Image (cartoon, rainbow, N blue to C red):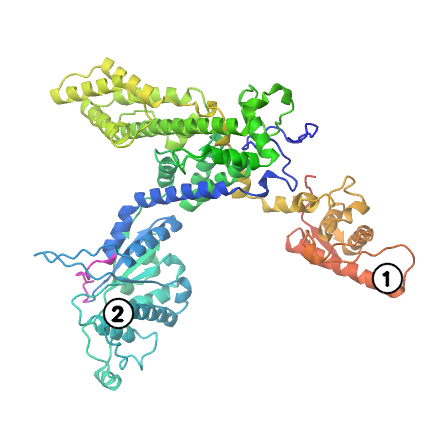
Amino acid sequence: MASAQEKSSLSATEGTTYIPFKPRKGSGSSKSRIPGGYHQAWNRCRKRINQVVFEQCQDTINELVEFAQQHESMQDSGLGIQEIPTALVVGRDRALLSALVSRATHALTHPETSQATDGKGKQKARTPPLVIQLEEGDCINTISALRALVTGFMTQFEEAAPANEPTTKKKATATLAPFDMARLVAGYDDYYSSRDDSPNLVVIFDRMEAYDPEVLQDVIYACRQVLFMPEITRLFTGFPISKYLDSLPFIFITTLSDSYYLQRAFTTATRVMLDPAILRPTSGAALCFEIVQRALYDYDSPYDILLGESSIKVLKEIIDKTDGRIEALITTLQLVYMEHYRYQGALLEAVPSLHDKPEPNIAEYVQRVEQAGPSVRDALMALMFIYKRQDPLSDGFRLTNLQDLDQTQYTPESMVNKLHTEHVKTVQNMKTLSSGLNVLHYLTWRFNSLGSYRQEVPLGFLDLLELDARGGDHLGKYAAWMLKKGFENTSLSDSADLVRDTFKTHIARHERDYQLPYSVELSEVANHLWECQVKNLEFGPEDRAQLTLYFTKLISFQFGLGHTEPYSELYYTETSSGLKETLDPAPRSAILSALVRPGAYFNCDCCDPEESFAPESMAQRPDICVLFQRSLDAGKLLNLADWFGSFVAVVQHEKVERVPVQTNTHGLRTRRRRSTEGDGDGEDMIEIQKEYQARFIQSAHELEFLGLIQTTGRRKEHVMRTVFETSD
C-alpha cells in the first residue's frame, strides 16, 4: 500500500481512473508500459472490425472478382478498336479501397474451388487470371512501366507452367528487350496457345491519381495495340505467327477518388481504348457507424472495454472531421484501448477472461494476484472499497483508513471471485443493452424510411450510445416517443411487416440465445397485429399504444444503467483529453513546454530543481534550453554578443562531470566541465571560449531550425525571436 502521507497534485479528471493513484511523472508511472492484455483485446477488436468491413463491402469484392474473370469484352469503341475492360473503384476512403482491391486480388490468386460447367448454353469458367500491381515507382517513365508489366507477367508464366511441359521457346524472345510487348505476346503464346482456355492478364493501379498520366496513356496504348511487326522483321527475328497478335486479354483495375479523373487526365484517343465500369463500395460515416454498431455492440462483440460518454464524443468528432475514413476510426479506437489498458491493464489481467474458457481456472488468477506487486493488490482492494462509497471516483483517490476494512473479505481468492462474477454480469448486461439499442435503431430507421416521422429526426447509433452513457431515463423517454410517433403514423400493413422483420432479425430465438428478455405481452400484441393484417381487421389506437408500450419495455431494459453496475470502472473508459492531444497535437506548444521545463520530458530532477532560474541550476539543462530561456528575457531583437554573454554566464557554472555519451539519458554530447577558479593557462581559456562559441552556434541554429528565431535582413548582428509569451 502506498504511503498515506503522499499527496496528489492532480484533481479529479474525466480520464480513465487508475487505482490507486500514482504520479504520472516518475519511473514507476502506470503509463510506462502497456500490459499484454491490451494486445489480445485489441486483436479481438481489430479482427471483428475487419470482419464487419469486408461483410459490408463483400458485394464490391465479388464484383471485382467476377470482373477480372470475365471473358473478353465484346464491345468496341466504334473505331474498330477492342476496348480494355477497366474497373474504377471510386471513393474518398483510399485505405478502404486499397484493402478491398487487395482482398479481391487474394481471392483471384488463391481460388478455393474451380467451378467449370460444360452444360449447353453455359460458358466454361476461365483459368484463374494472372495479377500484377504496378506501383507508382514502377511508372516513372514508359520504359520502366512496360518493363515491370512484361517482366511481372513473364515471371508468372514460368511459375504457372506445369513441371512436365517443355521449356519455353526462347528463340523469338532472345532478341527482344525486357520492356518489349512482343516478348509478352510470345510468352503468352508459348504457354497458352495449345490450351483450350487462357487466363486474363489483370493489371492493378492503386490510387491512379498518383501516377503520371502521360506514362499511363503510353501503357494503355501499348496494351491495346500490342504488336505491329512488319513481315521482314518477323522473318529476321523468327517471331511466330500468334493468335494473340491483335490483343492480349488485359483487364485493368484501379482506385480513384473521383470518377471524372479519366476525362480530365486522359485524351479522347486514350479513353476510347477503355471500357470503364464504376464500382462504389459502402464508405464514409455510414460505414463507420455500422462498424461501431456491429463490432463493439453486437451479440458476438468481445466487450473488452465499454465506451463512456466522452470517448463516444471523440469518435463522433473524428468521424465528422475525416469524412468517415476507416483508418481514422481504427486509429482512434486503438488509442482508446491503449489508454484504457495503460491505467487499468494490471487490474484487468487479474480478472478471469471470458474469451478463453467458459469456466476459467480461478486458481490460476488467484495465483497471479498473489504473485503481483503490492500496487495491484492494493488497487483491487481499493476498487472493492470504492464501490461502497457515495463520492464520485476521482483520479487522486487512495485508501487511507485500512481499519475500516474487513481484511478477511479482501483475500486474493475472494476478490477474484467477486470480480469474475461481476464481469460476467457486466458482459451479459451489455449484450442486453446492445440488443435493445440495435432494435431501437432498426425501428426508427425503418419508420423514417417509410415516412412515418413528420418533424422527428431519428438519432444515429453513436447518438443513441451517447444518450445512454449520460445515464438516467433520457434514452428510455426518447425510445417511447419515437416508437409512439412511428406506430401512430404507419399503416397497418407496413407496421405488421416491420414488426415481423424485427422479430426475425433481432428478437426471434433460433440457435442464438439473445439477451433480450422474452415478452409474452409483446408476442400477443404482435400476433394480434398479424391477424388483423391477414383478416383486414382494425388495429386501433389502443392496440398501437400497447404495441409501443411493450416494445419500449423490452428494449429499454438496460438503458442508462451501465455505470451503475458494480466494478464497472474496470471496463468503462472516459478517455478524451489524452486522445485529443494525440489526434490533434500542438507541436509548437509541446516544444516550448519542453524547452522551458525539460525535466518533465527527460523524467529527471536535475533539470528542474527548486531554484530553476538560478544560473547554477540552469547550467544543468541542455544548451538549447539555456539559450531559449535567455532569449525570453530580452526584447524583440536579440544582440548576438549580448546573447552569447548571457549564455556563457550560465554554462560557466558547470562543475559536475557529465556522464559518458553511451549512458547519457538526455541524448546530448559529452562535454567536459571546467572550473573557473584560478587564473588558468591562457591557452586553456582560449579553448574554453571556443567550446562555448561552438555550443552557442549549434544551439542557435537549432532554435532557428525550430522557427523560434529568425535572422534579419539589415542587421546581421541581431536575430529576431518569434516567441514572446509562454506559460511557465
Query: What secondary structure is marked by label 1?
Result: helix
Q: Does 434 sit left or right of 35 as displayed?
A: left
Question: Which residue is most to the right?
Answer: 679
- Say what amino acid the circle numbered 1 marks: Met
- Say what amino acid the circle numbered 2 marks: Ala
Of residues 486 and 454, which is closer to you in this image?
Answer: 486
Query: What secondary structure is marked by label 2?
Result: loop
Q: Which residue is drawn at the image coordinates 49% and 38% (left, top)?
A: 336
Q: Does 26 sit left or right of 421 as displayed?
A: right
Q: Which residues are magenta?
A: 68-80
Of residues 267 and 311, which is closer to you in this image?
Answer: 311
Write down the residue under mark 2.
161
Q: In which quadrant is the N terminus drawn? A: top right
Write down the residue under mark 1.
685
Q: In which quadrant is the C terminus drawn? A: top right
Q: Main secondary structure of the magenta part?
A: loop
Q: Which residue is drawn at the image coordinates 17% and 61% (left, top)?
A: 74
Cα distance between the residues tagged 1 and 2: 79 Å
Image quadrant in which you'd find residue 450: top left
